[in-house]
Image (tube, rainbow, N blue to C red):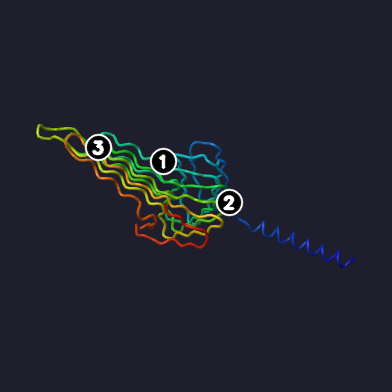
Amino acid sequence: MKNKIKFFKIVILLAMIVFKLSACGEDINHETVELGRTPSITRTVPANVDKISFIGVSGHNYTESSIVVERRSTPLIIVLENVYAVGRRGRNGNWHEDGGNGMSVIRVDGTPIDITIFNQGLQNGLIGGEGGTGGGGSRGNRGRRGGKGATPIIGVNKLTITGSATLVLGGGNGGRGGEGGGSNSLTNFGNPGGHGGDAGIAVTANQFIVNMTLAGVTIQAAKGGGGGPPWGNSSRGNPGQDDTKKYENISGSSIEPQILGGGLDNK
């Protein structure tokens, strides 16, 4: 009996030693951000942070959001829990100015890095900001072009999506073209509207890996902006390009997603 008790004491002691050693060996700098019902996310991720968790509220949209990852050479883990974030909208163009381009939700400064997004909660979403409306054309000229929609995450080499909650990824819609300018002469009876801005691409990364459990990734294809209205006897501007690629690398070439687990649903 004494030998059994001694044996169990040794086992417990060894387990405690292993636990302490593993805890000491874990050298991960982890930050947690409780969002609550704040209207937007504005956050800078320092270079010394290895993992950052954003805890949101289910059903709440965080609009005009911007997460900037400082220049680094190491990978980053981002945990999303009930976070549906939309990037900042581009500004509307003033008279004879193009609309501003939308902004990404997550932007990596410097050299592209590997990012893993771990999803938990009910559902998460990252949607690029939409382009601003083009300004009206100056006299005798067509309306100005609408701004481009943004991709939701930029500056990524390898993007890995994992976890147990659905993630929606989508580019921002393009902005509408501006109204055609007024007459500048007795022979000028109309000026066309501005062209719409192109839609943002849903995923821009050199590698895109989906490895989910009990869930998947939904790709929401963005739309190009509508053409601006003409002035007088002229034509409406051309609509912007829809997001037909959905996935491209940093150079702009199409890529194929790698599905290791879960599903990939294209809308």
Going by the numbered disc 2, the residue's amino acid type is: Asn
Q: Which residue is mark 1?
A: 88
Question: Is any atom of residue 84 visible in this view?
Answer: yes
Mark drawn on residue 10: none
Q: Is residue 48 above or below residue 100?
A: below
Mark drawn on residue 229: 3
Question: Is any atom of residue 48 visible in this view?
Answer: no
Q: CA distance from mark 2 to mark 3?
A: 53 Å
Q: Is residue 198 above or below residue 2?
A: above
How many numbered marks are there?
A: 3
Q: Secondary structure at mark 1?
A: loop
Closest to the camera, between mark 2 and mark 3, is 3
- Picture residue at 87% right of the left edge, 68% below the top: 3
The location of residue 206, given as percent across then percent down, is: 41, 60
Q: Secondary structure at mark 2?
A: loop
Q: Which residue is mark 2?
A: 29
The location of residue 171, given as percent across then percent down, is: 40, 48
Going by the numbered disc 3, the residue's amino acid type is: Pro
Q: 115 or 170, which is in the foreground?
A: 170
Closest to the camera, between mark 2 and mark 1, is 1
Q: 222 or 265, which is in the foreground?
A: 265
Residue with the most extreme left position = 187
Position of residue 6 in the picture relative to residue 204 (left or right) = right
Give neighbour class at mark 2: few <14, some 14-19, many 20+ (Cα, 10 Å).
few
